[in-house]
Every structure is written in structure tokens, then in C-alpha cells.
Amino acid sequence: QRVFDSLSDRLGGVFDRLRGRGALSEDDVRAAMREVRIALLEADVALPVVRRFIDRVTEEAVGQSVLKSVTPGQQVVKIVNDALVEMLGSEAADLDLAAAPPVVIMMVGLQGSGKTTSTAKIGKLLKEKRGKKVMMASLDVNRPAAQEQLRVLGEQAGVATLPIVPGQSPVEIATRALHSAKLQAVDVLLLDTAGRLHVDQALMDEMKAVAAISVPKETLLVVDSLTGQDAVNVAQAFAGEVDLTGVVLTRMDGDARGGAALSMRAVTGKPIKFAATGEKLDAIEPFQPERVAGRILG
Ligand code: GDP
């Protein structure tokens, strides 16, 4: 996960200076927090999220017990770390698969976000690491190659896909997928919904119709972590339309500002469940807030 590298460098400098000093005044803390604020904004973290973060950290850090302690710099860094972990979602959130099979996972997001690849990655992970019988179905009838793309990825991942029947609507495909999954005693059915270039109402309505008949246990929003503030807008739009249960952040291997990732939890109110880190079908890992915070703060 390289998306946090430049933020990490910036913050590292601030904290080295804090740690290097014996005593700290309230002004020192406030000055450091101004630098942290700028670093977060430059990393594209959403403004309200930054504001809340800085307020919380400042309030705790200028407390007497911190400033009068033997190692005030270290204490401030610890406070920042804890606030960062909270911003990222505190605990690692696992998929909730506790339901009668086939448990449905619906994947939603914009075209190009990495949705289809992530579907195949999660299918592979559930099969290989959790011993689940998995089936995947593409409901994307707008892009002619989409269903074929999932089929090919399924073959590479060793995960079954629903046979393609041309001419069906997304709801018809979802119905057929559920039926087929039941007949074959599938544990988890992954539904890859259509991606569009922009958030539009037709997409939302189609997604809701699919959700109504398939009753997904998980609805995962796939977001490209390199799209910055746009990612936040997309997340807000989706969160307002469907009951998201989690977020998958893709392109965490990318060399860019990772602020979207940091805002996602606060904006959607939903946990980041996976971080995708490359094009290979194994390049996905459960998102662990503590580890990510540790990496950012070096
Ligand atoms: P979709 O349109 O949302 O279904 O997006 P795709 O799954 O087709 O992915 C679009 C492109 O992004 C493909 O070339 C993928 O290989 C690539 N991709 C997906 N996830 C990642 C990731 O985590 N890191 C990198 N570097 N590339 C990714």
C-alpha cells in the first residue's frame, strides 16, 4: 500500500520534531497540528473529516497531563495515532456471511473502479481461504464485454461463474443466479452489478431492484483510492441510495495521494473491509486500521 507514502513523509517530519523536544507548550502543539492539517488536506482528505480530526487531537494534546508528562512529544504522537485508527474504522471488519446460503454479496461502484476484478478477488479469497463454495454472476448488460470479463477472471481464479445468457435484464440474471446457486448448494453468490461512468438514477434504480430480489447480506462499494475527492462524492451518492455494508478500496498500490481512503469511513459510516493492491487476483487483503495507521505514522 503505497498511497500513503507522501502523507507519511510529511507527518514523519512533524512528529520527529515533536519527539525531539524535551518540553512542549500549547503553542508548539497547535503549530504542529496546523502542519498536520495541511498535510491531510494536501493528501485530499475531506475537509470536515480533517476538521474533526484536528479538533479532537488538539483538545486531547493540549491537556495538562500530556504537556506536563516526561515525554510529551511521544504522547502527542500516540494521540494522533489513536485518532487516525478511529478515523480508519477502529477494528478490522470482516465480511458478515451469517445467513442461510446462498449468502449474497452485491458489488457496486463506478465503471473502472476495479469492481469486476475485486469481485473475482473476493471470490477467490472466500474459496481458497474460507473453504466456501462460491459462484459469481455479472449483471452488467450495458458493457458487452463485462460478462465475458468476469467469466475469464473466474476461470483464472478457479471460481464458478453463472453461464451467460444473452438478452436478459440484470434482475433476470440475478434471479437465475439465485436459483442456480440454490440448486448447486453454493455458499456465497457474488453479484457484480453494472458500473457506469457517472452516478445516475437509472443505475441506482437497477441496483435497488437487484437488491430487492436478492437481499444481499453484504453490499460492498468499490472505490478507486486514487480518485481523491471524487471518491468521496461517489461514496456519498451510493450511501444515500443503498444500504452499503462496507467499502473495498482499490489501487492502494498506486503512487498517489491516499486521502480518499482516509475519508471513506467517516463519509459512508461503513467499514473499509478490503484493500486491493494490484491487478493480480491475490492482490487483496482485509483492511486493518491499526496497521494502516502505523504505516502512515511510520
Ligand atoms: P470495473 O470497470 O470497475 O469492473 O473495473 P475492472 O475490474 O475492470 O478494473 C479496471 C482496471 O483496473 C483493470 O485493468 C484492473 O486490472 C485494474 N485494477 C483493479 N484493481 C486494481 C488494484 O487494486 N490495483 C491496480 N494497480 N490495478 C487494479
Image (cartoon, rainbow, N blue to C red):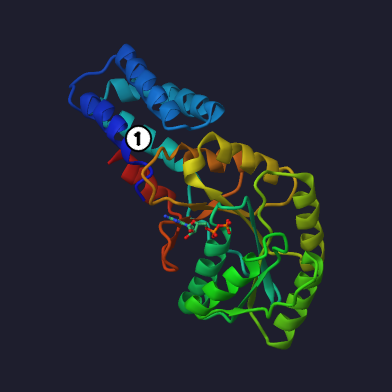
In terms of depth relative to the viewer, which is nearer, 111 or 242? 111
Left or right side of 192 for 22: left
Question: Can residue 87 be seen by looking at this rendering?
Answer: no
Q: Secondary structure at mark 1?
A: helix
List x then y, in percent, for residue 85.
43, 42
77 over 198 or under it: above or below: above
Quadrant hosting residue 189: bottom right
In terms of depth relative to the viewer, which is nearer, 31 or 23? 31
Quadrant in which the C terminus is drawn: top left
Residue on which the image places disc 1: 7
List x then y, in percent, for residue 196.
67, 51
List x then y, in percent, for residue 113.
55, 52
List x then y, in percent, for residue 128.
47, 78
Quadrant hosting residue 182: bottom right
In terms of depth relative to the viewer, which is nearer, 286 or 89? 286
Look at 43% across and 53% down and name the residue there.
288
Three-letter residue code for mark 1 = Leu
Look at 72% across and 52% down and name the residue there.
243
Left or right side of 52 for 270: right
Disc count in the image?
A: 1
In terms of depth relative to the viewer, which is nearer, 47 or 78? 47
Look at 48% across and 29% down and name the residue there.
53
Within 10 angstroms of label 1, few (less than 14), some, or many (20 or more) residues? many
